[in-house]
Image (spheres, helix red, strand yellow):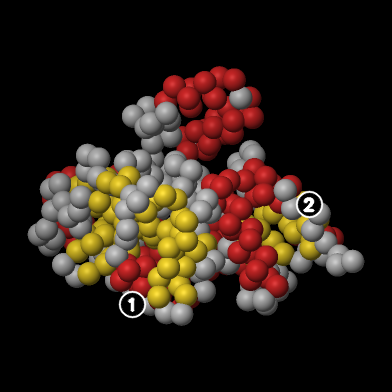
């Protein structure tokens, strides 16, 4: 009888943030022995060394920069010093919720993206704005999903003020409280009231965001006119795509989607990049522009407000590449917020020796 694979879920500082990994592993307990270790806890290394694990499943934090940096550093040690097999990969986790790092990574690899400037010197940033002609320009906070921390700077005056705040003692802050304009408000409020575990998790997140600010550097990005962004998701050999439609100034975080058949050259674009860099759990947000496709965001952990990532003629499914051609396969591939498919992919890569 084949022995069970021994898996460690690498949690973070947020309460119950590994529930999706735990849900899918529990359904496979006949072949998997597993444990959760908080990678942000003081005794993380001792517990990992004692465990003799075959495979690690990462759930990096996306709330505060200090815990994201801590998680990245410890994952680096785990992968490069201890030779651990981790999914998503170290490179995917480093890109996750780090707009500054992503901008460097895209530029270094000559991957098309909106021009992005990162300044750690206040005078350099002010000088740049004093000579900049095209507005609006986008100001971004380094961490934060669903459009949080994205600010449109419509004039030189607004941009200069933004830089002054970036280098002040107070710094820049993201919205820390619930988004009351977001859908399912009544459902979310009921869940917050009745579900103690969910309530504790949300309160801990709100407190953490409230207590953090970004200061000492500034991230600016060119504005790309758009009515929508493409979201292309790759998990293993499965590809999904839909449009995120614009609401107000931006599409990110709008939760307004349009489903339909994506252009195959869009899938080719994402497949080529993710193949080359061995990225197997990615959502890629993409603008269409007169310069072609431009990558706006890349995340290895991503939200899913609908029970599917793609509908073709009203049917959920995925695209797979078969003998050089994109083929649509109808089916429900995004259960448990796509973590079921993630585990299937992680086990396949582990058995093939690709992690």
Marks 2 and 1 sit apart, C-alpha to C-alpha, by 43 Å
Which residue appears at 67% of the width and 49% of the height?
A: 24
Q: For this rendering, which residue is in front, 153 or 277? A: 277
Which residue appears at 64% of the width and 43% of the height?
A: 19
Quadrant for the C terminus, please: bottom right
Quadrant for the N terminus, please: bottom right
Which residue appears at 43% of the width and 34% of the height?
A: 176
- Is residue 153 positioned above or below 188 on the image? below
**Label 1: which residue?**
110
The number of discs equals 2
Crowdedness near tag 2: few (<14), some (14–19) or many (≥20) residues, C-alpha within 10 Å? few
- Is residue 3 positioned above or below 194 on the image? below
Q: Position of residue 126 (x, y in %)?
A: 21, 57
**Label 2: which residue?**
29
List the single residue furthest toward the right: 1
Q: Position of residue 354 (x, y in %)?
A: 63, 76
Which residue appears at 11% of the width and 58% of the height?
A: 134
Q: For this rendering, which residue is in front, 7 or 120? A: 7
């Amino acid at each position: 009888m084949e022995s069970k694979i021994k898996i460690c879920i690498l949690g973070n500082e947020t309460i119950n943030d590994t529930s999706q990994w735990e849900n899918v592993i529990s359904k496979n307990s006949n072949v998997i022995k597993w444990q959760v270790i908080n990678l942000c806890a003081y005794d993380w290394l001792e517990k990992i060394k004692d465990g003799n694990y075959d495979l690690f499943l990462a759930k990096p934090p996306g709330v505060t920069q200090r815990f994201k940096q801590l998680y990245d550093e410890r994952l680096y040690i785990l992968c490069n010093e201890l030779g651990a097999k981790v999914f998503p990969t170290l490179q995917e986790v480093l890109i996750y919720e780090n707009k500054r790092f992503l901008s460097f990574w895209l530029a270094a690899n000559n991957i098309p993206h909106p021009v992005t400037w990162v300044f750690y010197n206040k005078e350099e940033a002010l000088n740049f704005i004093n000579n900049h002609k095209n507005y609006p320009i986008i100001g971004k906070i380094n961490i934060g999903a669903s459009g949080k921390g994205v600010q449109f700077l419509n004039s030189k005056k607004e941009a200069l003020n933004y830089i002054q705040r970036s280098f002040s003692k107070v710094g820049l802050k993201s919205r820390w409280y619930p988004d009351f304009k977001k859908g399912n408000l009544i459902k979310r409020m009921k869940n917050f009231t009745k579900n103690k575990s969910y309530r504790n998790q949300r309160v801990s997140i709100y407190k953490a965001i409230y207590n953090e600010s970004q200061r000492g550097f500034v991230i600016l990005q060119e504005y790309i006119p758009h009515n929508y962004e493409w979201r292309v998701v790759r998990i293993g050999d499965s590809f999904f795509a839909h449009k995120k439609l614009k609401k107000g100034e931006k599409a990110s975080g709008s939760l307004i989607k349009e489903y339909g058949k994506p252009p195959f050259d869009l899938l080719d674009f994402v497949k080529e990049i993710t193949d080359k860099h061995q990225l197997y759990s990615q959502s890629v947000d993409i603008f269409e522009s007169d310069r072609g496709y431009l990558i706006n965001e890349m995340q290895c952990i991503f939200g899913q407000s609908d029970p599917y990532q793609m509908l073709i003629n009203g049917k959920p499914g995925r695209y797979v590449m078969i003998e050089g051609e994109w083929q649509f396969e109808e089916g429900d591939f995004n259960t448990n917020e796509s973590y079921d498919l993630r585990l299937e992919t992680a086990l396949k890569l582990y058995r093939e020796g690709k992690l």
